[in-house]
Amino acid sequence: MATALFIKRSDIVKNTALNANVDTDKFIQFIALAQEIHVQNYLGTDLYDKISADIIAGTLSGDYLSLVNDYIQPMLIHFAMIEYLPFAAYSISNGGVFKHNSENSSLASKDEIDFLIQKERDYAEYYAQRFIDYMSFNAPSKFSEYYSNNNEDIYPDKDTGFHGWQL
């Protein structure tokens, strides 16, 4: 089954620090990766497939459209940035792996990149928790696919983040 992206280029540019001059080819795969790994983890297979099919068919509407616009897109935007930031300074081509360096600027340190990733993770987890809270009140009546997963399907994760090790 083909999968549609749940956000557009303009969504990530408008809602993050990503510069509008960044070539779409540099980050589009990270949107797809974040959607497949993180968003599907919270939606579960059946709801994820339903929304994807509706986007492809051009029939996303009503409660599903509101769910995507108000809860899923904000979550995906920040999960995509988490995936993109570690690779933003690099290009891979026939000649090898290259790190970009501008004459008028300096490269961010690993600690600075880690800080940015953590900030994006905080935002993503905030929106993921909003999604989980919304679904806990609305899923049974509005989104039956949220509970219809079976066998090898991904069941929706109802917890955000890693809360550390407990000994």
Image (cartoon, rainbow, N blue to C red):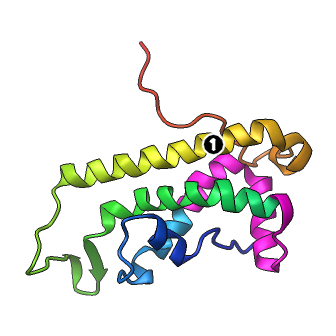
Residue at x 51%, y 43% (from the top left corner): 125
Does residue 66 appear left or right of residue 118 in this picture?
right
- Residue 36 vs residue 153, the one in the foreground: 36
- In the picture of the structure, the residue carrying the numbered disc 1 is 130
- Residue 94 vs residue 147, the one in the foreground: 147
Does residue 86 appear left or right of residue 55 in this picture?
left
Residue at x 15%, y 56% (from the top left corner): 109
Q: Identify the amino acid type marked 1.
A: Arg
- Residue 35 vs residue 17, the one in the foreground: 17
Residue at the farthest right position: 141
Residue at x 78%, y 55% (from the top left corner): 47
* Residue 18 percent location from the top left of the image: 37, 70
* Residue 120 percent location from the top left of the image: 41, 52
Does residue 74 appear left or right of residue 107 in this picture?
right
Does 57 appear above or below 64? Answer: below
* Residue 153 percent location from the top left of the image: 76, 49
* Residue 13 percent location from the top left of the image: 45, 73
The stretch in magenta equals: 34-63
Where, quadrant-wise, is the N terminus in this rendering? bottom right
